[in-house]
Image: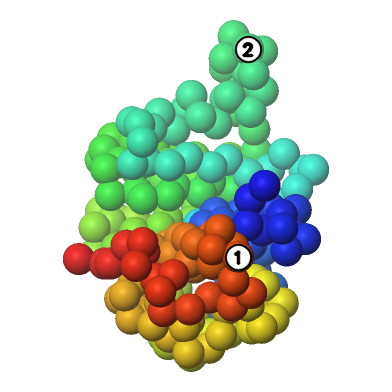
C-alpha cells in the first residue's frame, strides 16, 4: 500500500503534473489573464522557471475548451514540431488525405525554444488566416522571432518561484491539512528544494512515504534524509 492510500487519498496528492488550479498557489490571476488572452484571440507567452506552473496553466486552457476539440498541444522539447501536420491531425486521416485544416484553433507550444524559423512562420500564417485563433508559448519571450514578438507585444505572463510561505500553502491545498506534514517540516523541505516546485513536491511525497514506512504519524527531521537537494 502506498503512503497516500494509507491516509485515504486515491492518488499521490503531491503528483507533479495535472494538478488543478485551485490546489496551486499564485496561479489564479495568471490563469484568468491567460484565458482572457486566448478568448480575445491573442498570442501570449508564459515565462517561468522549472515547476512554476507553466504546464498547469496550459492544462487550464485545455480544460476550458474540453469537449470542443479546439486545442492543439505540443511539447517542443520532445520532438520537432510540424505545424501543418499538427493542425490537420485534428481531422485524423481524412484531414491529411484531403488537406483539411480546422478553423479557430488554440495552439499551445510548450517549451517553444527549439521550434524552427520555418515552423514559426507557418504558425504565423495559420494565425493570420484565422486557422489558429490564439497561440500560447511557454519559454522565454526574448527567444521569439521579431515578427512573432511584435504580435505578442507586452502579453507576457511571468510566473514567480515558489516562496517559503507559498510552499506551506501549497502543501495545505494538496493535503487539506498540515497535521501530518507540519509547516516547520515543509519549510525545511522547501529549503532543500531551493524553490524548485517539482523537486519540492517530489520531496514532500518521499518524506511522507518515509514517515509512513517507519510507522510514524508525523513527518520528522529523520524522514528527510532520503530527499533530494537542488543543485
Colour scheme: rainbow
Q: Which mark is residue 215?
A: 1
| 217 or 97: nearer the viewer | 217
Give the vertical position of 77 relative to 138 (above or below): above
- The outermost residue toward the top is 97
Q: Name the residue tied to disc 2.
A: 93
In the image, 97: left or right of 196?
right
> At numbered mark 1, what does the secondary structure look like: helix, strand or loop?
loop
Q: Residues within 10 Å of mark 2 (few under 14, many from 20)?
A: few
| 82 or 41: nearer the viewer | 82
Of pointers 2 and 1, the one earlier in the residue sequence: 2
Residue 38 visible in rendering: no
Residue 214 in percent (x, y) is at 54, 63
Q: Quadrant of residue 226?
A: bottom left
> At numbered mark 2, what does the secondary structure look like: helix, strand or loop?
helix
Q: Residue at x 40, y 58 (%)?
A: 138
In the image, 231: left or right of 48?
left
Q: Residue at x 35, y 31 (%)?
A: 79
* Number of disc labels: 2
Amino acid at each position: 500500500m502506498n503512503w497516500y492510500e494509507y491516509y485515504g487519498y486515491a492518488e499521490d496528492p503531491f503528483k507533479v503534473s495535472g494538478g488543478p488550479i485551485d490546489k496551486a498557489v499564485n496561479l489564479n490571476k495568471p490563469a484568468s489573464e491567460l484565458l482572457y488572452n486566448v478568448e480575445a484571440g491573442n498570442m501570449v507567452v508564459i515565462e517561468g522557471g522549472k515547476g512554476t506552473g507553466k504546464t498547469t496553466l496550459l492544462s487550464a486552457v485545455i480544460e476550458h475548451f474540453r469537449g470542443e476539440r479546439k486545442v492543439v498541444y505540443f511539447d517542443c522539447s520532445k520532438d520537432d514540431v510540424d505545424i501543418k501536420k499538427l493542425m490537420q491531425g485534428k481531422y485524423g486521416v481524412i484531414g491529411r488525405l484531403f488537406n483539411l485544416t480546422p478553423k479557430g484553433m488554440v495552439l499551445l507550444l510548450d517549451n517553444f525554444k527549439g521550434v524552427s524559423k520555418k515552423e514559426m512562420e507557418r504558425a504565423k500564417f495559420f494565425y493570420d488566416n484565422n486557422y489558429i485563433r490564439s497561440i500560447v508559448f511557454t519559454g522565454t519571450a526574448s527567444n521569439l522571432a521579431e515578427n512573432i514578438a511584435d504580435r505578442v507585444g507586452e502579453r507576457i505572463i511571468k510566473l514567480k518561484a515558489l516562496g517559503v510561505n507559498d510552499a506551506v500553502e501549497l502543501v495545505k491545498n494538496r493535503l487539506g491539512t498540515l497535521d501530518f506534514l507540519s509547516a516547520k517540516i515543509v519549510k525545511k523541505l522547501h529549503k532543500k528544494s531551493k524553490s524548485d516546485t517539482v523537486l519540492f513536491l517530489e520531496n514532500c511525497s518521499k518524506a511522507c512515504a518515509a514517515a509512513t514506512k517507519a510507522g510514524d504519524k508525523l513527518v520528522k527531521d529523520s524522514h528527510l534524509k532520503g530527499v533530494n537537494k537542488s543543485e
